[in-house]
Amino acid sequence: MKVQYLIPFVEAAYEVLKAEVNIPLERGDLSLDKGAYLTDDVTVIISLVGDIEGIVFFGFSNEAALNIASGMLGENLDEMNGLAQSGIAELGNVITGRASVKLSKNGFQSTISPPTMLLGKGATISTLDFPRVVVPLTSRIGRVSIHLALREAFRQGANAALLKVPDAPGLKQSE
Amino acid sequence: MANVKFMNPFVEAAADVLEKEVNAKVERGTLSLQKSSLTSDQITVLLSLVGQVQGVVLYGLSKSTALNLVSRMMGQEFAEFDNLAQSGIAELGNVITGAATVKLSKEGFDAEISPPTLVQGEGIQISTLDFPRVVVQLKTEMGDITVHLALRESPPGSDTGKNYVPIAIQM
């Protein structure tokens, strides 16, 4: 997976978390993971469809999710209730949406799906033949990680017709 | 509001695909509308739809059903839910959803599907948040598949080139 898909997500996560909850983040070491992901307490899954396709998910420890949701909503939440879930899913959505805007500025148009939320530690999520880049974000509020399983879509059909066909000198019409 | 009209294309597609791939007859079981989060089965295939219809489709099945299906699909016995079996089940979800979107587009709803994601682990909570789910059980001789459709028509004015923007949380 190319780094040019990755940077928009890291930037967007940084910007959104700073704006929503004023929490500074530090990026940990990137790694490429081909195996399945063993879930943390809270996971938000969002798909991308378009020039770039695949799956993005965000893993949070319970502590981190509650801290972020509390910060977003301006009140103290001590369990992952409906409101907290909605807040965290929204956060995933805003980060991914912002990243896709950045990607479109780089020439890759993609649409994002509504979020799905998993609650429960120890399930495995497999993105199958998509290798996954893991971006751990460290902050004082708890564990947060971003997982990107994205690739450039292989497009056929309508778009193929728009490709410029180079001139073949041998086929030029004779006078 | 989840739309029941989106359900039939999925049930038909599942019946077509399962008949073709594994030669299984599919019977439609009970139908229900659920708003709370679902408790996962042993295996869940998750795909998203983006376009004039948007949302999430989940296929839940037990490990034994999954093994029966892939064994039949690939013509060899699977005892373990290994990578090949996982890939087969995810592909099955992909093909059913793909066939359903072809049917949906004939009814005037164009949508693209995302690549599949496979979730393993029983008893975790999967929530589609503000999307209620139409849940339908598909019964086959190899076991049951539960299809969860959390779909809705995209809001007017939005098109596929624009992103789904959620309603902001009101303070």
Image (cartoon, coloured by chain):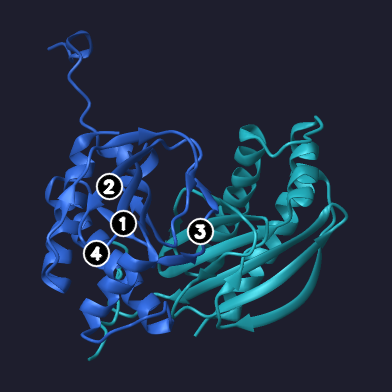
Of badges 1 and 2, the one in the foreground is 1
Circles 1 and 2 in contact, beta carbons < 8 Å: yes
Q: Considering depth in this image, is A132 or B54 the residue closer to the camera?
A: A132
User: Type of residue at label 1?
Assistant: Arg
Q: Estimate the x, y position of residue B94 in percent, counting from the top left.
A: 57, 49
Decide if residue B122 is in sight here: yes
**Residue receiving disc 2:** A136
Color of chain A here?
blue
Residue sitting nearer the eye, A63 or A69: A63
Q: Is A102 left or right of A159, judged from the image as shown?
A: left
Query: Which residue is located at x 20 percent, y 30 percent?
Result: A164
- Sequence-earlier tag: 1 or 2: 2
The C terminus of chain A lies in quadrant: top left
Q: Are marks 2 and 4 in contact (CB under 8 Å)?
A: no
Residue B116 left/right relative to B14: left
Q: Nearer the viewer, mark 4 or mark 3?
A: 4
Residue highlighted by disc 1: A143
Helix, strand or loop at mark 3? loop
